[in-house]
Image: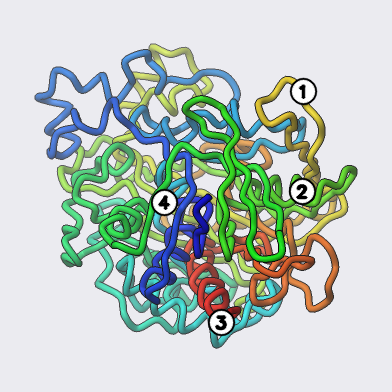
């Protein structure tokens, strides 16, 4: 049986970044991944902007609604509901291979080529030093890693009131993309009364995005087609499969798809990695010198729990509480649709009442156009016909504010692995996530403040929508960083305690989860972990 030098599990943001660091160091790397891709819609989406497609393309229903109307979902809002047909593959096979039992937590996981990074909103935020200290991250190492990751993926941003919470100390970034009329108007109103906002702890500015406004390494600058939820043909938006595609051109990288990693077992001179070949569901075993786990926090927890073969073990869980608030900007109602538009967040509103860049809440603010009316009509307190007529008039004035809250541990936030003879893995993840009354009260109070703040710059909340626990898709903290040798914890360098050659490169170690978009920090930590793997020879 072949002995691999380094095996990385997962092709998402953290797996791709850890693998790149190892490959660039010259070592031989293999990646185990299932790697589901969209083979139905990607090839038929034209290189045109949204309005042009709506006016002229006869096959548009296929990728906007889906061949089987899979893009339309009625009923209670739930995690992942707004995925468009070309993004639905992100969740393909998840119920089959990653079953979850819970009445209080509805996570989103992925077995796709590029993982959850295929649907990432591109927000890039540096954690502050207080946030890093609470999370268990090394400030100096992270600062260097942010610069490395930014050079790899390309980040756009600007210096304004929000930059202490977004680009922070970063210097290697491109100019922020252009704002549409909605956001230019909101931003102008904010700048006219920013002192009042700042005195109340609110800071508004441009988000930092993994989105190119200048060409980079064969990737094209953003073209403002407003097809961001459907296509990545220009590669202007960073997706982790872009990195993996480039790595596959290297002689020291080997991608092995259709493999679900179940567990590992350390032997004297190597580590066995036990998998299922998802093409035939037959077990397989690989051997390696070093194993780097990065399938996502919940996936890593499953692998570790199976590997230690211990029952009745509950691991902690961190997940940012989240809600979104559709708003109307009356000054924009009835205006003609804009040809050049963007689906990604165009403004970010941070709430930092302590003015110390800690315990900060973050709202990402989006225009609403290419996701189409049928996704929001059902939220209107009207019948479909009347709602459709009214919403068409309101469309140009719609914005969506998605609010994330910081997260710390709680005794009713746990996951465990329980037996399930009916599943292909013979187990399933059981999750409990219950906020304390104090947490609920704080979240509710903060969201009311956001509603008042956005109203002062000309946007009026329609309703607050809570998609349920897990809907933020920000998970961490299941194997906390620890300087002790406790089981089910990580050393600060990412080594799994109780092992010699098993490292974790995703967010499993974070002891605290800031509300700021965490993907940039996850990638920075993955790069650092890979460097630590190389030192651990």
Regarding mark 1 in the picture, which secondary structure is present there? loop
Mark toward the start of the polypeptide (1 vs 3): 1
Q: Specify the label residue 121 is tagged with.
A: 4
Q: Which mark is residue 535?
A: 3
Mark 1 or 4, which is nearer the eye? 1
Give the alpha-carbon distance from disc 1 to disc 3, as whole Å: 41 Å
In this image, 202 relative to 148: left or right?
right
Q: What whole-number distance in Å separates the C-alpha atoms at marks 2 and 1?
A: 17 Å
The Cα atoms of the two marked residues, 4 and 2, are separated by 31 Å
Q: Residue at x 67, y 51 (%)?
A: 264
User: In the rendered view, does 443 fall on the left or right side of 123?
Assistant: right
Quarter of the image where one finds residue 347: bottom left
Q: Measuring from the top left, give residue 219's x and y in whole percent.
A: 19, 59
Q: Secondary structure at mark 4?
A: loop
Q: CA distance from mark 1 to mark 4?
A: 37 Å
Residue in view at x 53 percent, y 50 percent: 1
**Seen from this angle, which residue lies furthest left?**
56
Q: Which residue is mark 1?
A: 421
Q: Earlier in the sequence, mark 2 or mark 3?
A: 2
Q: Mark 4 or mark 2: name the one nearer the start of the chain.
A: 4
Q: Is residue 25 above or below residue 302?
A: below
């Amino acid at each position: 049986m072949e002995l691999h030098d380094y095996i990385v599990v997962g092709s998402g943001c953290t797996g791709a970044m850890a693998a790149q660091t190892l490959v660039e160091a010259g070592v031989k790397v293999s990646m185990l991944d299932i790697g589901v891709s969209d083979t139905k819609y990607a090839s038929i989406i034209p290189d045109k902007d949204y309005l042009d497609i709506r006016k002229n393309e006869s096959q548009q229903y296929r990728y906007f609604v889906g061949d089987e109307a899979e893009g339309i979902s009625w009923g209670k809002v739930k995690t992942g509901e707004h995925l468009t047909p070309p993004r639905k593959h992100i969740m393909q096979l998840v119920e089959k291979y990653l079953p979850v039992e819970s009445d209080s937590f509805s996570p989103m996981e992925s077995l796709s080529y590029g993982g959850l990074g295929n649907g990432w909103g591109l927000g890039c935020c540096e954690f502050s030093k207080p946030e890093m200290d609470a999370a268990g991250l090394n400030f100096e190492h992270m600062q260097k890693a942010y610069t490395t990751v930014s050079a790899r993926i390309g980040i756009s941003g600007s210096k304004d009131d929000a930059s202490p919470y977004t680009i922070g100390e970063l210097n290697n970034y491109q100019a922020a993309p252009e704002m549409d009329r909605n956001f230019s108007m909101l931003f102008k109103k904010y700048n006219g009364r920013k002192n009042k906002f700042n005195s109340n702890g609110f800071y508004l500015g441009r988000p930092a995005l993994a989105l190119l406004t200048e060409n980079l390494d064969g990737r094209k600058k953003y073209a403002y087609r407003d097809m961001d939820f459907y296509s990545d043909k220009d590669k202007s938006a960073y997706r982790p499969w872009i990195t993996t595609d480039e790595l596959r051109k290297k002689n020291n990288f080997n991608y092995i798809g259709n493999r679900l990693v179940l567990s590992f077992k350390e032997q004297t001179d190597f580590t066995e990695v036990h998998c299922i070949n998802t093409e035939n569901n037959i077990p397989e075993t690989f051997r390696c010198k070093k194993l780097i786990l990065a399938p996502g926090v919940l996936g890593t927890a499953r692998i570790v729990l199976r590997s230690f073969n211990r029952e009745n073990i509950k691991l902690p869980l961190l997940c940012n509480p989240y809600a979104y608030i559709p708003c109307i900007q009356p000054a924009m109602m009835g205006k003609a649709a804009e040809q050049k538009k963007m689906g990604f967040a165009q403004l970010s509103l941070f709430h930092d009442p302590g003015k110390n860049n800690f315990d900060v809440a973050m709202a990402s603010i989006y225009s609403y156009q290419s996701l189409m009316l049928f996704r929001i009509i059902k939220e209107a307190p009207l019948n479909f016909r009347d709602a459709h007529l009214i919403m068409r008039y309101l469309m140009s004035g719609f914005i969506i504010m998605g609010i994330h809250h910081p997260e710390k541990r709680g005794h009713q936030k746990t996951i465990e692995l329980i037996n399930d003879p009916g599943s292909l893995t013979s187990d399933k993840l059981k999750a409990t996530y219950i906020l304390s009354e104090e947490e609920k009260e704080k979240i509710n109070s903060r969201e009311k403040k956001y509603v008042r703040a956005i109203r002062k710059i000309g946007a009026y909340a329609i309703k607050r929508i809570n998609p349920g626990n897990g809907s933020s898709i920000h998970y961490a903290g299941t194997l906390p960083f620890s300087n002790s040798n406790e089981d089910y914890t990580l050393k600060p360098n990412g080594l799994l305690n109780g092992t010699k050659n098993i490292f974790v490169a995703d967010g499993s170690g974070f002891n605290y989860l800031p509300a700021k978009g965490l993907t940039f920090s996850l990638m920075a930590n993955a790069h650092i972990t890979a460097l630590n793997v190389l030192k651990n020879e």
